[in-house]
Image (spheres, rainbow, N blue to C red):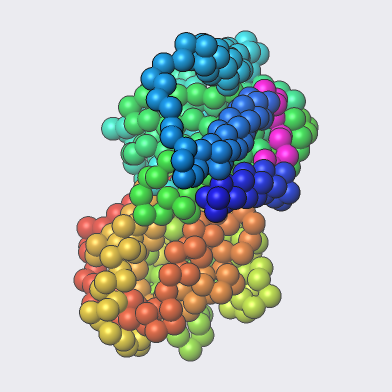
Amino acid sequence: MAIAVVLVLLVVGSVAFHFLSPWYFTPIASNWGMIDDTVTITFWVTGIVFVAVNLFLAYSVYKYRHREGLKADYEPENKKLEWWLTAITTVGVVAMLAPGLFVWGKFVDVPDDADIVEVVGQQWHWSFRFPGADGLLGQVDPKLMTVDNPFGLDPDDPNGQDDRLIASPELHLPLDRPVKLLLRSKDVLHNFTVPQFRTKMDLVPGMVTFIWLTPTRTGRFDVMCEELCGIAHHAMRASVVVDEETDFNGWLDAQPTFAELRGIPDGDATVGQAQYAACAACHGFQGEGNQQLNAPKLAGQEAWYLRRQIRNYKNGLRGSHQDDIYGQQMAGMAATLATDAAINNVIAFIQSLPDNPAVATVTGDVDRGRDKFTTCAICHGNQGQGIWALNAPRTAGMSDWYLLAQLQNFKAQIRGHHPTDSYGKQMSMMATMLTDETINDLVAYINTLPINDGAEQVAMRGQ
């Protein structure tokens, strides 16, 4: 009797939870309402079966419970019952599978007028590529991927010269226009998912997969990787912004082409030396840093990272939090570098400065810090040398007090709070694993790492 009651309560509780729960689909933002309908049909079919089977089980437990003087009958076959069960099961299976086949038929039938966008996944980052006026994407080759050419575009392919390259994890799409997303992975298996679009597809190394959709409402939506791809899988995020067509066209026109990026001249260290004079007042004439002025060491840091941070200050991604006092100061200074050429010149001069290890000021348990650094090394390298392909800057030989302050800022979300600072958000997620004590231990261990003169110090123009 007790088991029968429990089964009935299980059914009632499950049904009530389903209908009263606040958790359900996000409001749809694409043309794929058929997928919602298919899921709803599946819920109804499986829900009816769940209720019927469990209520029948409760009835059977109660009806045929043990009672003195009663003996069970053995009936090995019942053709009538078997026919009924076969027919009902067939109807249920068809009701679940048939809608999915119709959806799949539409899913693989891409409209002829669909725009083309390439989505590139890598640990743990998204980037995007649009064809130029010719409507054709240039050829790519993994062997051509470098710090200067992260997409691996063939410089000799004329179709790729006008490709629009978006290295930041923010994709814009026009409203009410079908788009075909070509999905490519640089390393391991990933999955491109936007919950509001209802579509998802794996990015398989060595091949190009695709999905297509038509955005139906404007807004900003999260992109997630829903295939376990490594230790920072949870932090592999991006954004899709659906714009009115005029706004989308303005955004796309502002994105650099492959030819434009290749045409950016290398920075002039001689010109940059004069421009660096203002920086030297805080960071030192040799880029050695000055803790008293809260200015970290610059010499030895990768050019691509310096360039990105200067742009982040200029664009408000850094230095906009009310508690980031020193970031606000730096934002004002970064504004004095008015052009990309000025930024490149200053960075070229910084790259010429001697790379001497910063003086150690942070102490802690080095052995415990070594254990914590195991996670950091996945992106930043076993020697803290930095890995440009993972968007991870060098940490070895840099200002330890600055590393300490930034880890604390990431943990407190003073840094990484800006809605478009995707890399900052990644670090905020990772920094939450550290306590105040283990942060000191971690930085103390980083102080023991040697400077790798052969680390990836090549300038990453345009990134």
Residue 30 falls within the magenta-colored stretch: yes
Q: From this viewpoint, is residue 328 visible?
A: yes
Q: Which residues are magenta?
A: 25-34
Total of numbered circles in the picture? Answer: 0
Left or right: residue 33 compared with residue 223:
right
Percent of width and height locating residue 414: 59, 72
Query: Outermost residue, front direction?
Result: 69
Location of residue 425 by image quarter: bottom right
At horizontal 33% and vertical 76% (from top left) the residue drawn is 442
Percent of width and height locating residue 325: 62, 79
At horizontal 58% and vertical 30% (from top left) the residue drawn is 49
Q: From this viewpoint, is residue 333 visible?
A: no
Task: Name the one closer to the observer, 82 or 159.
Answer: 82
Task: Name the one closer to the observer, 22 or 393.
Answer: 22
Percent of width and height locating residue 441: 33, 81
Left or right: residue 451 compared with residue 166:
left
Task: Name the one closer to the observer, 24 or 455.
Answer: 24
Location of residue 412 by image quarter: bottom right
Left or right: residue 289 compared with residue 341:
left
Is the stretch drawn in magenta largely helix, strand or loop? loop
At horizontal 24% and vertical 62% (from top left) the residue drawn is 382
Left or right: residue 157 compared with residue 127:
left
At horizontal 43% and vertical 34% (from top left) the residue drawn is 71
Task: Name the one closer to the observer, 199 or 331.
Answer: 199
Percent of width and height locating residue 409: 53, 74
Is 406 situated above or below 301? below
